[in-house]
Amino acid sequence: MKKNFKPGCLTIMLVVIAIGTCEWALVTANLVTGNLSVAADNVTTTVNQFQPVDDDMHHFMEYVFEPNYRRLKVLMAAKPKDKQTWKSIKGDSLTLAECANLLLARAPDEDADQWRQISMAVRTSGENLYQAARKSDYGTARKAFVAMLTKCNSCHNHFAGGEHQLTP
């Protein structure tokens, strides 16, 4: 299998199974440069440009981020009382943190550096929320949740004219 790792670059690795063929593939995405390499059974294909399924940012936010945010808003309103609630918080926070990585590859032409800075801050806050949830630490999780929403709102202020403000 091809290895396409570069020190200092953000790389996401996903192991996927191709439906219908039951073949395993290793997919690595270098989100800083937008390169995607796919290796399976000694056949390697490189796609030079990151290609979103839907390049409309509103759709991406509405269908990927918003459902997780809405669930977390309810779950984080009070200290969770059971393991299932913490499991849901872990799942949604990890999903948001990982999806923030995808934002890096969707930077607009204008103010791309600011976009990437805010995206990394959202990812870091989401990771902090996830790690706190793994420890069932509501106080730390709540602070991380609020910090993440603050970063989301700063992005919305800068790139969406202040629309779509999120509340804890």
Image (cartoon, rainbow, N blue to C red):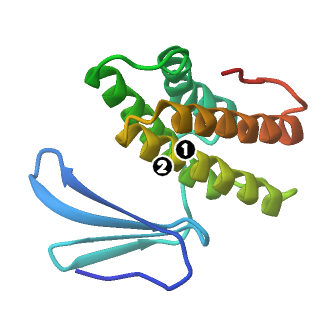
Residue 56 visible in the current orientation: no
Q: Residue at x 43, y 47 (%)?
A: 131
Q: CA distance from mark 2 to mark 1?
A: 8 Å
Q: Are marks 2 and 1 in contact (CB under 8 Å)?
A: yes
Disc number for residue 18:
none
Please tell me which residue lies in front, 155 or 39: 155
- Helix, strand or loop at label 1? It is helix
Residue 3 visible in the current orientation: yes
Q: Amino acid at mark 2?
A: Glu
Q: Position of residue 7 (x, y in %)?
A: 50, 85
Q: Which residue was labeled with disc 2?
A: 98
Of mark 2 and mark 1, the one earlier in the sequence is 2
* Residue 115: quadrant of the picture: bottom right
Q: Residue at x 29, y 82 (%)?
A: 2
Q: Position of residue 91 (x, y in %)?
A: 37, 34
Disc number for residue 126:
1
* Residue 40: quadrant of the picture: bottom left
Please tell me which residue lies in front, 53 or 11: 11
Q: Quadrant of the N terminus?
A: bottom left
Q: Position of residue 26 (x, y in %)?
A: 26, 66
Residue 79 sits above or below residue 12 on the image: above
How crowded pointer 2 is (Cα within 10 Å; few <14, some 14-19, many 20+) is rated as some
Left or right: 57 with respect to 4?
right
Q: Amino acid at mark 1?
A: Gly
